[in-house]
Image (spheres, grey):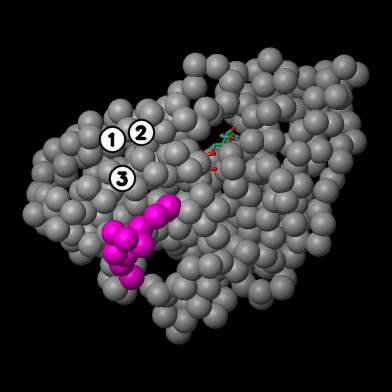
Amino acid sequence: GTVLGIEGTAWNLSAAIVNENDVVAEVTHTYVPPIGGIHPREAAQHHARFASHVIGKLLEEGSKKGVSISMIDGIAFSQGPGLGACLRTVATASRALSLSLGLPLIGVNHCLAHIEVGRWKTPARDPVTLYVSGANSQVLAYKMGKYRVFGETLDIGLGNALDKFARSAGLTHPGGPKIEELARKAKNYIPMPYVVKGMDLSFSGLSTAATDALGRASLEDVCYSFQETAFSMVVEVTERALAHTGKHEVLLAGGVGANTRLREMLKIMCEERGANFYVPEKRFMGDNGAMIAYLGLLMLNSGDILSVEKSHVNPNFRPDSVDVTWINEKDL
Ligand code: ATP
Ligand code: FE2
């Protein structure tokens, strides 16, 4: 089969055509806020403005690769979680495509798409996934028909915590890569609030504490201490999920996964536990249309489609609310 999928939960508008073999084509247009963080309404306006351009260009690239519009079997879109205004814009475009082409509509959970593209593009089969992006921070694993959330942030995502601190330190958005760079030049570790409650995480206090520490410590040391603390927290929860589930693989997903220090800490933990650690290629780590199209394809193949009437978006769409129709337990 062949599916066209559209991602647009936040600032990235990205559409792709995939089939079982590979990504045929992908076109991305990113909303860059003039200053500060994401303004949801402006990001949605960006998506509305560029949707037809992105899809037109995608169809053109697809036909250059030998996949014409008539070969597409379904239209997938990210149904949530994400910013309501952005989700609605992408859903509207997807419904229009589905109706005008007479193709089934597939509503994809964004978090699960991150996991499935990782299972597709790495050797991971049945991993514990650490998904850390701007808005999301979750530890997930498959168990009896669902992806369970073993731990998650109780307030803001790790990426947003980094970005918020970065802004307060006068660094430009996105802050994550700049913090990583500065942390390399640090000399001292400054104690920071390490907040793991059961299996859940909290980053909001850490972000504030890092801002407060700027008065007494160098920016480099604060960046380093923030990273060491936050990454130790997510590694601890990932390790406990591994122990609890008895699984032997860890998959990293989300934009924060670009961080070299986070990867190193996860790798060490996995080596100590005899688990395999998988990191997809960068293009499949952050938000991308290919992951939505790919999970859309898996869902289409298992008959998991939506009627237009039931295609409303869900800004709080929980990955553990989805019946995983596309995995056969005995294949894992
Ligand atoms: P989602 O809608 O899934 O929350 P997103 O819009 O936040 O996604 P992503 O590309 O998944 O998009 O993640 C962006 C986040 O990743 C930003 O918060 C950014 O600061 C962070 N990030 C990017 N590179 C690094 C890095 N090297 N180290 C730490 N954080 C990083
Ligand atoms: Fe994401």
Q: To which residue does mark 2 refer?
A: 47
Instruction: Say if mark 1 contacts mark 3, CB within 8 Å.
Output: no
Q: Quadrant of ligand 1?
A: top right
Residue 104 belongs to magenta span: no
Q: Residues within 10 Å of mark 1 (few under 14, many from 20)?
A: many
- Foreground pick, 273 / 145: 145
- Secondary structure beneath dot 2 equals helix
- Please indicate whether residue 144 sits to the left or right of residue 324 in the image: right
- Secondary structure beneath dot 3 equals helix
Q: Residue 326, position in %: x, y?
A: 38, 73
Residue 307 belongs to magenta span: yes
Q: Residue at x 75, y 57 (%)?
A: 200
Q: To which residue does mark 3 refer?
A: 92
- Foreground pick, 269 / 7: 7
Sequence-wise, the earlier of marks 1 and 3 is 1
- Please indicate whether residue 220 sits to the left or right of residue 114 in the image: right
Q: Residue at x 90, y 36 (%)?
A: 191
Instruction: Say if mark 1 contacts mark 2, CB within 8 Å.
Output: yes
Q: Which residues are magenta?
A: 304-313
Q: Amino acid at mark 2?
A: His
Q: Residue furthest bottom?
A: 330
**Image disc number at residue 322:** none
If the image is split into quadrants, where does the N terminus sit?
A: bottom left
Q: Amino acid at mark 3?
A: Thr
- Disc 3 to disc 2, how far (Cα)? 11 Å
Q: Residue 132, position in %: x, y?
A: 60, 47
- Foreground pick, 325 / 20: 325
Query: Can residue 101 be seen?
Result: yes
Q: Amino acid at mark 1?
A: Ala
Q: To which residue does mark 1 refer?
A: 51
163 shown above or below 264: above
Prevalent SS, magenta region: loop
